[in-house]
Amino acid sequence: MNEARSRDNYFYFKALTTRWMDNDVYGHVNNVTYYSYFDTIANCYLIEQGGLDIHKAESIGLVVASSCEYHLPIAFPQVLEGAFRVNKLGTKSVEYGVAIFDGEHPEACATGTFTHVFVDRASGKSIAIPGDIRRALIRAQNQH
């Protein structure tokens, strides 16, 4: 099994649910929707484990790169599980490894990457990853 497709290679999991509007005319979740799932799992981790206050924090993470590989189709109605890990941790940026599992298959339905650069909310200038978030990211990096 491809390493990125195995549950064992992820640190944090979060339940996700497909929505009626996620399906396209072909009867499966449209490819662009996977990026919304990836965004949700990464930000849930930052909020729950890193203490990110999405409304008041002085710093925010902006997506600068993302990728997705599709392995198995999913469709509404399905309960999914988003998976998260840290692939690379820099001073001002982090690349996450993300995956979507459907509960029926041992391998991920989709895998990808998602990169945040942290910036000052007011100025938009890149800054060091804030301490609590950095510590949470180190925990996620050291677990795979």
Image (cartoon, helix red, strand yellow):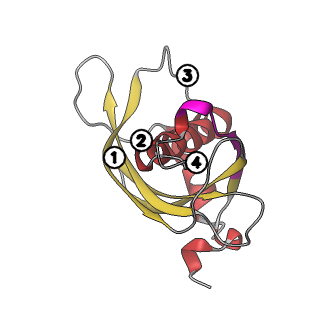
Q: Which residues are magenta?
A: 13-21
Query: Where does label 3 land, which residue?
Result: 53
Q: Picture quarter containing residue 49?
A: top right
* Disc 3 residue crowd, few under 14, some 14–19, many 20+, Cα 10 Å: few
Name above or below for residue 35 compared with residue 21. Answer: below
Q: Answer whether residue 19 is magenta in the image.
A: yes
The residue labelled by disc 4 is 135
Dot 4 or dot 1, earlier in sequence: 1
- Amino acid marked by disc 4: Arg
Q: Are marks 2 and 1 in contact (CB under 8 Å)?
A: yes
Question: Marks 4/3: CA distance?
Answer: 16 Å
Tag 3 or tag 4, which sits nearer the N-term? 3
Q: Secondary structure at mark 3?
A: loop
Asked if the residues shown at circle 4 and circle 1 are in contact, with their CB atoms under 8 angstroms apart, the answer is no
Across and down, in percent, residue 26 comes to 48, 49
Q: Earlier in the sequence, mark 2 or mark 1?
A: 1
Q: Which residue is mark 2?
A: 129
Up/down of 143 relative to 121, above or below: below
What is the three-letter code of the residue carrying label 2?
A: Ile
Q: Are marks 4 and 3 in contact (CB under 8 Å)?
A: no
**Residue occupying the point 71% across, 41% down:** 77
